[in-house]
Amino acid sequence: MHFLPQKAFALPIAALVLALSVGARGGDVPDRWWAPGEGRVLPAALDYDNDHGTLRTLTVGGPLKTAGHPFFEPLGKDGRACVTCHQPSDAMSLSVKSARRQWDRTDGKDPLFAAYDGSNCPTLPQDRRESHSLLLDRGLIRVERPWPTKSFNGNPVTPDFTIEVVRDPNGCNSGPAYGPAAGKISVYRRPRPVANMKYLLAVGFPYDPKQGYALPLDPDDGKPQSGNLMADNRAGNLRIQMEDAAATHLQMLKALTPAQRKTLQDFELRVYSAMQTSKAGGALDSMGARGGPVRLRDSQPGALGSIGEPVWSEFKAWESIPKDEAAKLTPEQLAHRQSIARGAKVFREKMFLITDTAGINSRIGFGNPVRNSCVFCHNMSQMGNDVAPGQVDLGTTTLPFADPWDDLPLFKVTCTGRPHPHYGKVIYTYDPGFALTSGKCADVGKITLQSMRGLSARAPYFSNGLAKDLRGVVDYYERRYSIGYTEQEKQDLVNLMSAL
């Protein structure tokens, strides 16, 4: 971990920063993990090394005193804070590596492993590693949804499908206290990053082209919602998301106060996180490239209906580095930078057939298949998420496309009305996704697209941790859509994603 000096630091803060920086050298040390209630100062700029280089997190208006701050203080009965699952070293998310480190350091006593959702099920013996295997091996947190589903305002939704539990390896979808019969369904998902929020909240269309209907309106300000905050879109604005997390993951007995909500929202809108340095390629904002979080901080999402600059044009200058500039690099650095630039072109230009993907092939105006590239869905400048609101089913949680996993619950969904456009009347899934919010069989398996910044710091990937590393992400898409990537193209895509 490295703290960056800020000219505006008062002397006492600068001294504290220096002390922490010195204490952080030497590899795996405790202060890489931000524990609830520590009271540390969050610098305006904070660097953490990972396997691919250095991640930088910027806090606009920082340094920030975390003592008393609701994001960093334990607010619930288990001693958890928001920061527990949204670590600065992990791009404001949570990596498997960090979870395993905390298990080993604390013998499984860290609040991260609280029985409610940090274990596979509260009914299991909590002192055993295998009871927390989904978190330790896949980075998954248990999410309990009501059944039948309810809208964000608590009103019941009448689903057009039934759901049965085919397999329940962890016990949280059966028995008197859990499962559909008890009015609960447990699914397991990755924590989403709490950074770069202005992009996630940006609305690129006045309607939802994936579903074909008007966007839901924010109950607080009446504006259209982006739908990019949560995997199943059960919370459309930051207030609802905070209240959902406080009541469930923090197990707060009292609701957040208006002052706490305001402080949390202010903080979350000021945090930007992205890779700053590539271990193999060097600084990502040099020789004409514009990588790193500064551009995220200083740029704006495209206007309504606009994608803006071509995605990952940050690295266009590296497509052809002048000889005098190239001479300043080692051969390895030059080759890696050229690979990143090629990966950006492959991402934008390699065309393939997208088939049987609800939210894409079922969109109004598109057929099945449709020919396009990665930017068909990952198109927002600077971020790589979708400017078009709505969720997509990539098959990551649903058979036959998902990997056969024995440690996740398996559900049988039967459409009672119109069959699913691609799976038919009966669907087998590990996570019904957006259908648990909308109540629509056509939405089974749909998941909000992941943010692409800071990927190097927060493996594994996809909502259920399907890909353990960046190569696994590329391999899944290759498997799912038979794209025909060459080995060089696969490596170039990995190198690009490692630089985001």
Image (cartoon, rainbow, N blue to C red):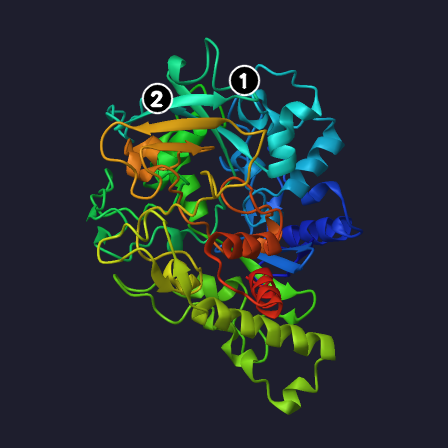
- The kind of secondary structure element at disc 1 is loop
> Residue 100: percent from the left, percent from the top?
69, 36
Residue type, mark 2 in image? Trp
- Image location (x, y in percent) of residue 166: 47, 22
Quadrant of residue 149 within the rendered picture: top left
At mark 2, the secondary structure is: loop
Q: Local crowd at mark 1 within 10 Å, few (<14), some, or many (≥20)?
A: some
In the image, residue 337 sits, relative to residue 64, either above or below, namely below
Residue 125 picture location, percent across and down:
65, 15
Please tell me which residue is depicted at 65% across the width and 72% down the height of the picture: 336
Residue at the spot 56% in from the left edge and 17% down from the top edge = 122
Q: Nearer the viewer, residue 475 or 457?
A: 475
* Type of the residue with mark 1: Gly
Q: Which residue is mark 2?
A: 147
- Which mark, residue 171? 1
What residue lies at 60% left-to-right and 38% top-to-bottom?
A: 138
Q: Earlier in the sequence, mark 2 or mark 1?
A: 2
Quick check: can you spot residue 136?
yes
Front residue of this view, candidates 237 and 136:
136
Q: Nearer the viewer, residue 171 or 59?
A: 171
Please say whether residue 37 is visible from this viewpoint: no
Q: Residue furthest bottom?
A: 324
Residue 289, position as x, y percentages in the image: 54, 75
